Image (cartoon, grey):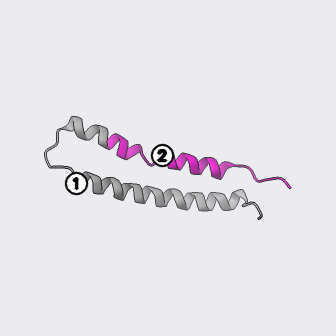
Amino acid sequence: MPHMKQRHRKLIGALLIVLSIIVWASLATSIYLAFPPGLPWYVLIPYFIVAGMGWTLPAMVLVKWMARPDASN
């Protein structure tokens, strides 16, 4: 099986990152809307930090994959 060129990995990776952000934002919003109303700020702030930064871990894995150099044959 031929190896994928970096150019193609970058295109696929960029599309996957955008898709993952959309999915993560939808999931985080759905979870937030399930919270009971009137929660104090000290409960909401940690949630928003995790929800706001949670997409970065999958994105880092994708960026590492995208940046991998082409295999030399």
Residue type, label 1: Ala
Question: Is 46 situated left or right of 66 in this image?
Answer: left
Q: CA distance from mark 1 to mark 2?
A: 23 Å
x%, y% of residue 54?
42, 46
Residue at 54 percent across and 62 percent down: it is 15
Q: Secondary structure at mark 2?
A: helix
Residue under numbered circle 2: 56
Question: Is 46 situated left or right of 19 in this image?
Answer: left
Residue type, label 2: Thr
Q: Secondary structure at mark 1?
A: helix
In the current view of this chain or complex, which residue is farthest to the right? 73
Cβ atoms at labels 1 and 2 below 8 Å apart? no
Residue at 58 percent across and 51 percent down: it is 62
Q: Which mark is residue 34?
A: 1
Q: Quadrant of residue 38?
A: top left
Q: Which residues are magenta?
A: 48-73
Disc 1 crowd, CA 10 A, few/some/many (<14, 14-19, 20+): few
